[in-house]
Amino acid sequence: MIINKETIAELAKDNKRLDNRSLTDFRQPIKIETDLSWTAEGSARVQIGSTVVMAGVKLSLEKPYNDTPDEGGIMVNAELTPLSSPEYEVGAPGIKAIEVSRVTDRGIREAKALDMKKLCIEPGEKAWFVTVDIVTINDDGNLFDASGLAVLAALKSARFPVVDPETGSIDYKHKTDVALPLTKEPLPVTVYKINGRLLIDPTQEEEKAYDARLTVASDTKGTISALQKGGDAPLTIAEISSMVELALEKARFLRSELNKFLAD
Amino acid sequence: MSQLLVEERNIVVPGEALAEGMDYLPGENTYRTDQKIYSKVLGLLSTSARVIKITPLAGPYLPKPGDKIIGRVTDILLSGWRMDTATAYSAVLNVRDATTRFIRKEEDLRKTLDIGDYVTVIITNVTSQNLIDVTMKEPGLQKITGGRIIRINAHKVPRVIGKKASMITLIKEKTGCSITVGQNGLVWIKGTPDGEFRAVEAIKVIESKSHEEGLTEKIEQFLQ
């Protein structure tokens, strides 16, 4: 709605938002559930405000790629379902779906979060490949952060299936206790710039009003693994520094939320 | 013998038999087949004398003449604008219904209303094919500037307005906002940021508790 877009920009100037949140607050409730699907090796459902995203992890044995014969692999796919927003259609993924999946993928891949060598069983012959699927249930903005959180939660909850030592076939109905070789835990946080102000966790309306955004994926130590800039407006160096700082701070917050839910 | 099969103010579903016998008459959202009267919609049953009618609880808004609605300009036509009415059908606003100002023959209509603009309009005519004609030539109808627009269930609009506009007057007084409620469920709220937020919260409460008794008092407390 164009009217709301103008109002959002005006309000941002006074550090205010349509829903009376502060610019740097996540929506409540934040809910994380894991192990929802018994057909997937790992799964999670994340809710931030009224945005709901599910992620699933499937493991399969494949032949490694020729250039990395001693490594497994990871693939991230996102599907923005028509049930989650009137803007999405069925069919081949659009630009937004591709961006969500690739930004999430890059955060994990470039952090070297999964020890790919440990996924290899027989160099050049057999290695575990991790397929992550992101499915949106409801899109009320901030799919990047919700997807990143859901994928990390799903990866953490994933357990290898039982493999028959003789035939080498996978018994997906039974799981072992072995978790994925997750060495780092990257989490993306997206900072939006609206009318010169920086804010996080936008609603769908706010997502229509932004000038620029920067997604920062960082691990437990605060090491940045991936960046993605979007939007038409340029960013100054000073702005990028404060965006990164804000993103790192909020990643710590999301991480504590995640640990809280996983501990329960 | 005629008899009512469902009690007054009960919730009924489409296809549910409401009454038996020819002494009752089918009213709004009901129909008669053979000896029985059935419901067309999900809603609350009410009777007045022999007429049975259903007040719908959910479903789309159906445009009817005389309703004030909020529309969004989606296209510019040769002599007017096409509008999205938040219904299944679009409306046409003719130039002569939009402004009293003289518009020259080849003037750019975007100067008056551009695509994406919201306007408050009144429905003048709905044809059998559901083509809607709207006008802005009534007092208070205008292009919307500033504030925010929210969308609510169109069937809750009467509760948001209240008896003799009591509810909406209450919200306006307590929050200091100007509020325009379109019958199609779009609500325009303009005031201070804090006032706007409280008005939105109040309207959401009304929407979720519309069936409860003493709603006006509850909202008064809520807005204290």
Image (cartoon, rainbow, N blue to C red):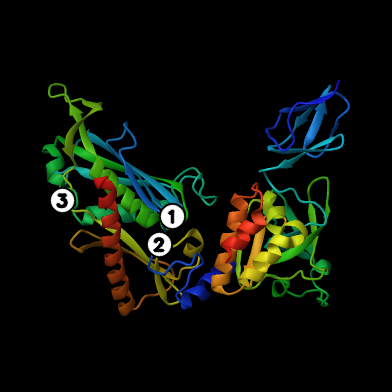
Gap between marks 2 and 1 measured at Cα: 9 Å
Chain that bears disc 1: A
Give yes or no for contact between labels 3 and 2 (Cβ–Cβ under 8 Å): no
Answer whether residue A6 is visible to the viewer in this image: no
Answer whether residue B158 is visible to the viewer in this image: yes
**Which residue type does callout 2 highlight?**
Asp
Give yes or no for contact between labels 2 and 1 (Cβ–Cβ under 8 Å): yes
Local SS, label 1 = loop
Q: Which residue matches tag 3?
A: A183
Gap between marks 3 and 2 measured at Cα: 27 Å
Picture disc at residue B158: none
Chain that bears disc 3: A
| B61 displayed left or right of A57 | right
- Among the 4 quarters of the image, the one containing residue A45: top left
Q: Which residue matches tag 2?
A: A201
Residue drawn where x is 33% and y is 44% of the image: A33
| B47 displayed left or right of B83 | right
Q: Residue furthest right?
A: B23
Q: In which quarter of the image is the N terminus of chain B?
A: top right
Gap between marks 3 and 1 measured at Cα: 30 Å
* Residue A27, image x, y percentages: 41, 59
* Residue A208, image x, y percentages: 50, 64
* Residue A239, image x, y percentages: 33, 76
**Which residue type does callout 1 highlight?**
Gly
Residue drawn where x is 65% and y is 65% of the image: B171
| A210 displayed left or right of B180 | left
Do pointers 3 and 1 mark residues of a single chain?
A: yes
Q: Which residue matches tag 1?
A: A49
First in sequence, mark 3 or 2: give its number: 3
Q: How crowded is mark 3: few (under 14 residues within 10 Å), some or many (20 or more)?
A: few
Q: Nearer the viewer, residue A82 or B110?
A: A82
**Which residue type does callout 3 highlight?**
Thr
